[in-house]
């Protein structure tokens, strides 16, 4: 059995969610996916089942598959879980970080700022998630790394679904302070800044704004944003980076 189409579908959906091209509530039609990825519906169903297991897709009987739409309570629980996990990650990373790691993180921060300046939201989001996942790898705990990968995906979906009014960038430089505290091996400061960063993100959530989308599933999965266009071209609001 060739599982390649299933992997392609899973990767495309996860990438689109992580770059806020595919919004909460978007329908993932079997026929549309089958045509888009040139595969049969059995491949599509297996891919959707895999995405449902990752808790980013909901399978509704007699209605089909949809990107999950987290409630306000679920959104708060995701950020609560991230604070708990990322504090543990920070404690372990501070004892393992090297100068090379610091150089990588600072290069990542610079690239993130450059993407933000040119309004390349997909790239900014990818780099922001990459920052957090690099810290998770530094911790040396593969289980926490897997948990955080799922949580950053879900929080990106939440931030796109409930973006802050006015698209405030008050937390845009949080990663700088986190990296500085990490390289100074200042565990107490690192824990405080990590916690504050995640609380900034959660505090900016606006639960009064419903998700909006005006583009096709093809554009959401492999369209203009995936080929270098700015995030605002996808037709729905973009939340802050993670």
Image (cartoon, rainbow, N blue to C red):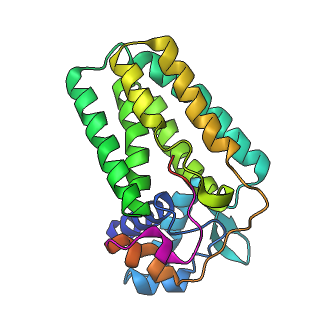
Q: Which residues are magenta?
A: 228-239
Considering the whole magenta stretch, tell me its main secondary structure. Answer: loop
Q: Nearer the viewer, residue 58 or 120?
A: 120
201 left or right of 100 in image: right
Q: Position of residue 135 (x, y in %)?
A: 39, 30
188 left or right of 60 in image: left
Residue 30 visible within the image: yes
Report the label total: 0
- Location of residue 64 by image quarter: bottom right
Q: Position of residue 186 (x, y in %)?
A: 42, 12
Q: Residue at x 36, y 49 (%)?
A: 112
Whether 117 is among the magenta residues is: no
Whether 230 is among the magenta residues is: yes
182 left or right of 234 in image: left
Q: Residue at x 40, y 33 (%)?
A: 176
In the rendered view, would you say 158 is above or below 135?
A: below
In the rendered view, would you say 122 is above or below 241?
A: below
Residue 1 visible within the image: no
- Location of residue 38 by image quarter: bottom left
In the rendered view, would you say 81 is above or below 153?
A: above
Q: Position of residue 80 (x, y in %)?
A: 67, 34
In the rendered view, would you say 138 is above or below 33?
A: above
Q: Nearer the viewer, residue 181 or 77?
A: 181
Q: What quarter of the picture does the N terminus occupy?
A: bottom left
Q: Nearer the viewer, residue 9 or 181?
A: 181
């Amino acid at each position: 059995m060739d599982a390649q189409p299933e992997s392609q579908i899973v990767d495309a959906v996860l990438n689109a969610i992580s770059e806020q091209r595919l919004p909460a509530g978007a329908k993932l039609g079997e026929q549309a996916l089958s045509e888009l990825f040139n595969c049969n519906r059995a491949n599509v169903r297996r891919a959707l089942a895999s995405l449902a297991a990752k808790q980013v897709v909901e399978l509704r009987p007699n209605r089909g598959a949809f990107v999950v739409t987290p409630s306000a309570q679920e959104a708060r629980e995701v950020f609560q879980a991230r604070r708990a996990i990322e504090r543990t990650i920070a404690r372990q990373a501070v004892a393992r970080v090297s100068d090379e790691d610091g150089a990588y993180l600072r290069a990542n921060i610079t690239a993130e700022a450059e993407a933000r300046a040119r309004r390349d939201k997909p790239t900014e989001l990818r780099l922001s998630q990459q920052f957090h996942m690099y810290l998770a790898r530094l911790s040396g705990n593969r289980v926490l790394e897997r948990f955080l990968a799922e949580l950053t995906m879900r929080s990106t979906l939440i931030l796109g679904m409930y973006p802050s009014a006015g698209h405030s960038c008050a937390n845009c430089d949080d990663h700088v302070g986190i990296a500085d505290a990490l390289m100074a091996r200042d565990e107490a400061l690192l824990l405080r800044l990590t916690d504050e960063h995640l609380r900034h993100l959660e505090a900016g959530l606006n639960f009064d704004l419903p998700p909006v989308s005006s583009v096709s599933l093809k554009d959401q999965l492999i369209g203009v944003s995936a080929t270098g266009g700015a995030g605002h071209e996808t037709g729905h609001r973009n939340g802050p980076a993670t």
